[in-house]
Every structure is written in C-alpha cells, then in structure tokens.
Image (cartoon, grey):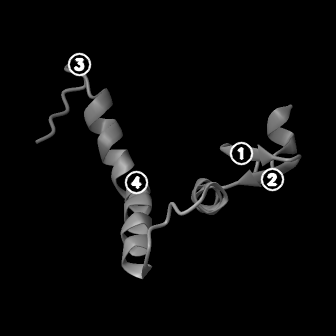
Amino acid sequence: ELKQTLEFKQMPILEVNGKSYSQSQAIYFFLCRKIGNLLGNNEEDEYQILYLLNCYPDISPSLYKVIFATEKSGEQYN
C-alpha cells in the first residue's frame, strides 16, 4: 500500500514538512545543505565527499558477496 504512494515505487524516502523526497543521492545532498556545511569548505572538499558517496553503488555488490558468502556456496573472495 505504501509502495503505491511512492514517487518511484521504491525506498528510501525522506519526508520533511509534509513533502516527500526520494532517491538516496538526492536525499544525501538535500540533508547536507539542510543541516549545514556538510559538503566541505571548497570545491575540492565537495568533490571528495561526492566521490565517496558515489563509490558506494559501485562497490556494494562486491561487499554483499563478501559479507554474505557462506562456506556452503563454495565462493571464495580474496
């Protein structure tokens, strides 16, 4: 039921003052600006922060395999 009300029919969502925000990267940016100076003091700081935020989708599938690998699966990770 909740899923049908979501903009892209998926989580995460953030609701602030009755307005819903979706898409995790956009939410990160919104919160960084809303809370205060969380994007650094200059363009280089902001780049490093955005770089780290955007690394997560690239490395998370590999991390899941390592974290949830079992002896039974026969998978080995170096």
Q: Mark 1 near mark 4, Cβ–Cβ under 8 Å?
A: no
Picture quarter containing residue 56? bottom left
Q: Mark 2 near mark 4, Cβ–Cβ under 8 Å?
A: no
Picture quarter containing residue 29? bottom right
Residue under label 1:
13
Q: Nearer the viewer, mark 4 or mark 3?
A: 4
In the displayed structure image, the side of residue 32 where residue 5 appears, left or right: right
Residue under label 3:
72
Q: Quadrant of the N terminus?
A: top right
The amino acid on which the numbered mark 3 sits, given as a three-letter code, is: Lys
Q: Mark 1 near mark 3, Cβ–Cβ under 8 Å?
A: no
Q: Residue sitting at 79 percent across and 38 percent down?
A: 3
Q: Secondary structure at mark 2?
A: loop
Can residue 67 be seen from the camera position used here?
A: yes
Residue under label 4:
56
Give x and y (percent) for residue 12. 66, 44
Q: Quadrant of the C terminus?
A: top left
Mark closest to the chain's N terminus, 1 or 3: 1
Q: Nearer the viewer, mark 3 or mark 2?
A: 2
Q: Secondary structure at mark 3?
A: loop
The amino acid on which the numbered mark 2 sits, given as a three-letter code, is: Glu
Residue under label 2:
7
Mark closest to the chain's N terminus, 3 or 2: 2
